[in-house]
Amino acid sequence: MSQGFGRVALVSGGARGIGAATVRRLAAAGWDISFCHHRDEQAAVETEKAACELGARVLAVQADLTAVAEVTAWARRAEEELGPVQAVVSCAGITRDLPLTLLTDADWRAVTDTGLDTVFHLCRAVLPAMMERQSGRIVAVSSVAAVYGHTANTPARAGIAGFTRALASQTRRYGIRANAVTPSAHAGRTDMTAIWPEATSAPLTEAIALRRFASAAEAADRVAFLLSDAAAEITGTVVEVPSGISLTLAG
């Protein structure tokens, strides 16, 4: 029997990129999954089909995670249809790679609302039940943009890591672990990195000790590990994928 059989996980942003890879990886590990997407119905159908073929029960929901009521309704529906939610993976995010002089108020709010605020909304929706059960696992997906990015992306992504550390300090007494993953996914492989020009890739890889980007599948592997029993003693940690991102960029 696969590890995690019968356990239920929520995955936000699960239709594409790292979110979709995470849905498939958790399905392969025996988790039942509810994932949400905002607008991409076709990608959601494909991800749902792939997870079902791996033996998981899957509930795909279209939801706007910037709307608190929709987040709450999603979490409640998942519990009703799949069972108690034991894990949450926050993968939702957008990017606006613009210098400050070109960044509008709407751009700033879009990035922080979709990236940072949705982590807050999702965790707040599931924590009361997790605290009552004295058990839970939370992984927030940040980004290499937390140390290398533009004016809106970097604060939002760095905020995810900081929020997760603070959450871990508050929830460990309830048997709830909270960790973050900061992937440096290959340009073009996810929506978050597809807009990076090729010229940007060289200095960015020079800032990574392994001199290469991670794949969505590698990021999903780290998420699955942090949700597994093998990571039972790990909380308040930010895991880089691949490791060794330097704050000083070459070039």
Image (cartoon, rainbow, N blue to C red):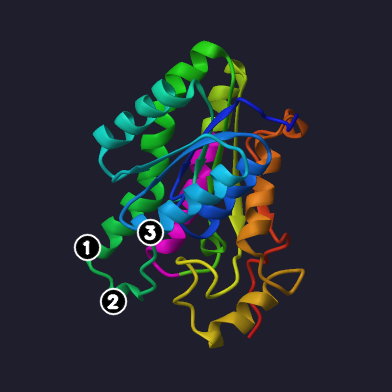
Residue 197 sits above or below residue 152 on the image:
below
Residue 14 tag number: none
**Residue reaching furthest to the top:** 132
Q: Is residue 77 magenta?
A: no
Label 3 element class: helix
Q: Mark 3 or mark 2: which is in front?
A: 3
Image quadrant containing the C terminus: bottom right
Q: Amino acid at mark 2?
A: Thr
The residue range painted magenta reads 150-166
Q: Position of residue 122 (x, y in %)?
A: 40, 35
Label 2 element class: helix
Q: Position of residue 204 (x, y in %)?
A: 61, 76
Magenta: predominant secondary structure element? Answer: helix
- Camera sees residue 19: no
The image quadrant of residue 5 is top right
Question: What whole-number distance in Å separates the C-alpha atoms at marks 1 and 3?
Answer: 31 Å
Q: Amino acid at mark 3?
A: Gln
The residue nearer to you, when weighing 19 against 42, is 42
Residue depicted at 36% across the width and 36% down the height: 121
The image quadrant of residue 56 is top right
Q: Earlier in the sequence, mark 1 or mark 3?
A: 3
Residue 101 tag number: 2
Q: Position of residue 247 (x, y in %)?
A: 63, 66
Which residue corresponds to mark 3? 42
Which residue corresponds to mark 1? 105
Q: Residues within 10 Å of mark 2 (few under 14, many from 20)?
A: few
Mark 1 and mark 2 residues within 8 Å of each other at the beta carbon: no
- Camera sees residue 229: yes
Left or right of 119 in this view: 176: right
Residue depicted at 67% across the width and 29% down the height: 4
Left or right of 226 in this view: 83: left
